């Protein structure tokens, strides 16, 4: 049973994502899905979107993983590594084998290797000449990012930009508030993960999956559910119980 | 020097209201406005003007709370900057009470940049101009940066018991500012909300206060809370 050719899968993914853009979507949810598409369509083990805040710091907006160790790696990427350079230059940065790059990024490289990643590629997120951030791709095996793969990555990064800007023409005046809003949404989602961790005694990774499953099943924005959990004390117990239903029943 | 470096230099390590005032004074100089103020729009008991470049700025800012409307309040509700080029413009009718009142005070331009603390839009940095006119691109970007920095003194001011933070000469709010947006700190904040039945901003304040009191970073404290090595008291 042969899989459809990669081009077909890429086009299907793009069509599906563009459809989502035309509907009502949650930025954190959609960007998380984009990272998952990256992992499926490209030969990478993990992907993450880093966005610039008003102080020009890169911050993690979404990633394929909620594993603490890998999230940490993405956050480290915000200080040192290919994504920082990619954001600063607006150009892709690609390292086929991190084992040769130890001098360049003395903190990032050991951490990445330790996490099982050997190749890293960063693709800029750009809109109308403004660089919003970077898409970081991690591979478990060494290797270049081929032209076809780079094009796929740039396409997905571009969809991410459109999702973040949400029909506002990209000028500095509109871009910065949108980035702040996206990053603020991420903060609320992180808080909700912590709250669910405590209330349901689950890992933060599972808390994210539960939150997402509940939101999608109820046709709600993940950020809205998270905000309700965090700010509406009266609704909280009910929402927590409802989310708990999505946990795999323990045997 | 980058804008945020200039603003930080003006704040010069201060905390709370003093930091807010300094930030406002710096905005007046850097963005060519006539007055600046930082307001908190959090809940009934906690709203008001918390920092300003001077008495006139405080007056302009407090007006919105008096009349219950204004660009600053709107910027928090809308979670976006609200920019008023000229309150005297015939087509500018968004604030039927606030507009004329401000014109009486000779203010025609108002630029309200919302301030985010712990993921919530809790206040605004308000810039006022006597002459009508847009903020140019650099001034606008700079104002967004200033609004970002305003989160730290606002966080200080949400803490009723300021002592630990404001009076500790070694306390490091400004270098810690970045760590406050890390995933672990937000996750630990969420855990504290569940454990102590408090609001996220208060949870963040407590986490930070514990970090200062123990001489550790917010991130380290957050990790301990997440791994259940540390539990903060309800007191």
Image (tube, coloured by chain):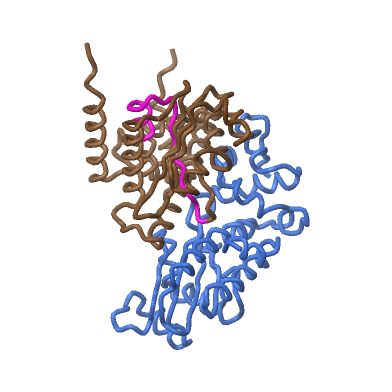
Which residue sits furthest right? Answer: B169
**Quadrant the N terminus of chain B occupies:** bottom right
Q: Nearer the viewer, residue A166 or B5?
A: B5
- Asked whether the viewer can see residue B187, the reply is no
**Quadrant the C terminus of chain B occupies:** top right
Which colour denotes chain B? blue
Kindly indicate the quadrant of the structure image that contains residue A157.
Answer: top left
Image coordinates for residue A40, horizontal then vertical, percent:
34, 26
Image coordinates for residue A207, horizontal then vertical, percent:
46, 31
How many numbered dots are placed on residues in this image? 0
Q: Report the residue at 36% width, 29% height from top.
A: A146
Image coordinates for residue A249, horizontal then vertical, percent:
41, 18
Left or right: B21, with B142 as reference point: right
Which colour denotes chain A? brown
Q: Is residue B94 above or below residue A188?
A: below
Image coordinates for residue A182, horizontal then vertical, percent:
42, 48
Q: Is residue A39 magenta?
A: yes
Q: Is residue A222 above or below residue B44?
A: above
Q: Which residues are magenta?
A: A34-54
Q: Is residue A114 magenta?
A: no
Q: Nearer the viewer, residue A222 or B178?
A: B178
Left or right: A248, with B222 as reference point: left
Q: Nearer the viewer, residue A227 or A109?
A: A109
Kindly indicate the quadrant of the structure image that contains residue B99.
Answer: bottom left
- Asked whether the viewer can see residue B148, the reply is yes
Left or right: A90, with B195 as reference point: left
């Amino acid at each position: 049973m042969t899989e459809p050719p990669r081009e077909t899968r890429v086009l299907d993914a793009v069509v599906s994502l563009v459809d989502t853009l035309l509907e009502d979507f949650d930025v954190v949810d959609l960007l998380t899905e984009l990272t998952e598409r990256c992992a499926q369509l490209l030969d990478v083990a993990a992907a993450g979107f880093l966005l610039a805040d008003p102080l020009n710091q890169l911050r993690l907006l979404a990633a394929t993983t909620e594993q603490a160790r890998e999230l940490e790696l993405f956050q480290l990427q915000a200080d040192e590594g290919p994504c920082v350079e990619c954001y600063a230059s607006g150009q892709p940065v690609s390292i086929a084998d991190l084992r040769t790059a130890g001098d360049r990024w003395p903190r990032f490289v050991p951490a990445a290797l330790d996490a099982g990643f050997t190749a890293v590629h960063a693709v800029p997120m750009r809109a109308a000449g403004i660089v919003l951030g970077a898409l970081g791709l991690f591979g478990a095996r060494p290797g270049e990012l081929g032209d076809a793969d780079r094009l796929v990555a740039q396409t997905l990064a571009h969809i991410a930009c459109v999702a973040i800007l949400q029909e506002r023409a990209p000028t500095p005046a509109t871009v910065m508030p949108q980035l702040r809003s996206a990053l603020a949404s991420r903060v609320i989602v992180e808080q909700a993960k912590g709250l669910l961790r405590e209330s349901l005694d689950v890992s933060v990774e599972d808390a994210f999956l539960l939150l997402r499953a509940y939101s999608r099943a109820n046709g709600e924005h993940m950020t809205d559910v998270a905000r309700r959990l965090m700010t509406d004390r009266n609704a909280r117990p009910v929402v927590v119980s409802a989310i708990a239903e999505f946990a795999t029943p323990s045997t | 020097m980058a804008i945020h470096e200039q603003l930080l230099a003006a704040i010069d390590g201060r905390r709370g209201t003093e930091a807010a005032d300094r930030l406002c004074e710096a905005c007046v100089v850097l963005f060519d406005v006539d007055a600046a103020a930082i307001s908190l729009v959090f809940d009934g008991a906690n709203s008001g003007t918390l920092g300003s470049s001077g008495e006139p700025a405080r007056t302009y800012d407090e007006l919105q709370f008096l009349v219950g409307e204004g660009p600053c309040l709107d910027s928090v509700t809308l979670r976006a900057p609200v920019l008023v080029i000229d309150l005297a413009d015939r087509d500018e009718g968004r604030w039927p009470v606030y507009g004329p009142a401000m014109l009486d005070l000779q203010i025609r331009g108002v630029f309200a940049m919302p301030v985010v603390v712990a993921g919530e839009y809790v206040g605004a940095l308000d810039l006022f101009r006597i002459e009508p006119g847009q903020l140019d691109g650099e001034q606008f970007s700079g104002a967004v940066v200033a609004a970002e920095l305003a989160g730290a003194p606002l966080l200080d001011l949400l803490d009723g018991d300021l002592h630990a933070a404001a009076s500790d000469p070694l306390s490091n709010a400004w270098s810690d500012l970045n760590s406050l947006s890390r995933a672990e700190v937000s996750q630990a904040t969420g855990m504290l909300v569940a454990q102590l039945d408090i609001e996220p901003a208060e949870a963040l304040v407590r986490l930070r206060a514990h970090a200062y009191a123990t001489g550790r970073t917010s991130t380290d404290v957050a990790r301990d809370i997440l791994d259940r090595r540390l539990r903060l008291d309800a007191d």
